Image (tube, rainbow, N blue to C red):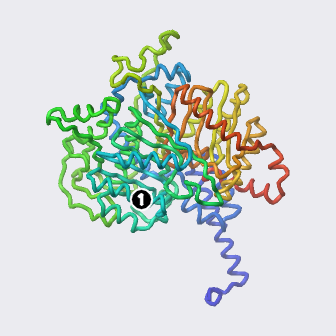
Amino acid sequence: MFAHWIPLDALHVGSLIALAHLLGVAMAFHAVANTRTSQGAIAWAVALIAMPYLTVIPYLFLGSSRFAGYVDARRLGNQRMRTQTRGAHASRHMDDGGYAAAQLGANTTRALTYLADMPFVAGNALRLLVNGRATFDAIFDAIDSAQHFIAIQFFIVRDDALGRALRDRLLARAAAGVKVYFLYDGIGSYDLPRSYVERLHAGGVEIRAFATRKFINRFQLNFRNHRKIVVVDGQRAYVGGLNVGVEYLGEKPRLSPWRDTHLELRGPIVANVQFAFLEDWYWVTQRLPDFRVPSADAQAGDAREAWASVDPTIARDVALSDLALDEGVEPGRDVALQSGAQIVPQAQASPAEGHAAVSETRHDAPAPQSGAHAADETNDLDQALDVVPLPPPVPPLEPPELLHPFRPGDPRVPGRRPGTPDVRCQVIATGPADRQETASLFFVEAINAARHRVWITTPYLIPDEAVFAALRLAVMRGVDVRIMIPSRRDHFVVFEASTRHAHDALKAGIRIYRYRPGFLHQKVMLIDDRAASVGTANLDNRSFRLNFEMIVLAVDRDFAGKVEAMLVEDFAHCFEIDASEYTRAPAWRRLTMTIARLFSPIL
């Protein structure tokens, strides 16, 4: 039928080929001008010119890592919120950067504090959750015991046995009067049926998709929210690599047994995880969630102090409602972001529209602009957001006998209970709206801090030049650098690109291990015997620059020892690869690996 109305003679075929190449050349110029990194620009330009028939359409959806309207709006919203909540957001516990500096180095600690815009805080308890069963047993236990609120966020949510178990528990707690806030990524959870969302919504759960207002565009496909967060009553938080689907329990035979790691956190660090969820929730809904934990004997004049007194070790759980209280706006309603602006009522949006109901709006809030006006607005915004103060210098290290001036149970440490664990932690919440490439720079700084050992596990090994350089330099310093990757693939192109990068790493002296039993999905890093991180970020460009991620860094020898024991067990189930994995591969596969590596900037 197609051939009936378009004659496929040589002239028409030649015209179509010429048009495809013209489009490819035009988009190659666009890629060079707009892609964030030189590697990405070169990769797209070569692919668009050489293979326009295969790459023009993907470039429309994935090509640009910049989406100025979104990035500017996100930066502005985050900056305003952080500025106005700074007093409440600052830890009410002692900033234990001194201890972290003693372990990692003063310069490293200062860089990480500035990079994350989050302090190191003490007085925390951490528990490693190995694989899906242990993780969801812990999460479900926390949800079942929730009394006040639940904040939950996943990249992938499936309507299978695990997803329905989660749904039923959330509905039960919502029916008991617990406030439940649920975020899921609109692309990662593309196959989540509407009936799943509607049932939660009907049961009193506030559930939203992290996506744009438009159906499909580059922003929606590129900027994914890859975070996995659960916070219960401000007392327990869960962060790590597991999503909601039975495959994460090892029930997908091709990838089973699934190897992953999650982290349970208790203590003041929970409030920093909670704050990252608040930023995402506010972006999607333009409303603050109600994270208050009321006390029965609270008086109107000191309500915030009463909420904080529920548990001194989590006094910062009140921080996330302070902004609303300070502005005279109830939590769950729009927040005034500009002092002196007029608030006027607005009709509520229909829940069926998939957006939060809005009860107030700013009379002077600017509408989206385009053209010259938008450019002027962007320039003003850049000038406003460039004025971000540097953190204070890390104080000089104390003599060895004074490195731990406060011990667990010391009454001088606010909220510290006798006998409680005392792990120093930092939350690194990263995303494409960051002024710096936060995730990439975190790995660079952490690797540079290593003196004896850096062990990394990642499902995808596609490092950028900065991280690869840090790994090579660590080898040159005599550091034991090992990277554990899967032996089974879940994505063909990504696996082939990872294999090619693994060959490059071997030539640099980095030891590469493949996990044999099943698919390896954990994202863990061990630095000497002093620090370890668990999070959602892979060692790839998508995590470095395009996704929203979360990493928890713990500076604690006992915790690092537990991570070491876990990884030693994992290495026992691995085999170390050498150059022959690449050199002895068939020529067609080596070519496939090389071509796949060209797409590294978007993988």
What x and y, as percent, mark residue 173? 32, 53
Q: Is residue 399 left or right of residue 45?
A: left
Say if residue 555 shows up in the picture: yes
Q: Where is residue 435 shown, x and y percent of the image? A: 47, 40
Query: The disc labelled 1 sits on which kind of residue?
Result: Thr
Near mark 1 (Cα within 10 A), the count class, few <14, some 14-19 or many ≥20, is: some
Total marks placed? 1
- 29, above or below 568, in the image: below
Q: Is residue 54 left or right of residue 337?
A: right
State the residue in front, 365 or 126.
Answer: 126
Figure quadrant of residue 439: top right
Residue located beneath label 1 in the image: 212
Q: Position of residue 380 (x, y in %)?
A: 37, 43
Relative height, residue 541 to residue 271 (above, below): below
* Residue drawn at x 33%, y 56% as measured from the top left: 172
Taking the spot 80% from the left edge, 49% from the top edge, the residue there is 581
Q: Quadrant of the N terminus?
A: bottom right
Which type of secondary structure does the marked residue at label 1 adopt? loop
Camera sees residue 378: no
Relative to residue 600, is residue 183 drawn left or right? left
x%, y% of residue 92?
33, 27
Q: Pick whichever, 199 or 226, lies toward us.
A: 199
Name, please, the residue furthest toward the left: 300
For the residue pair 153 and 68, the one nearer the viewer reads as 153
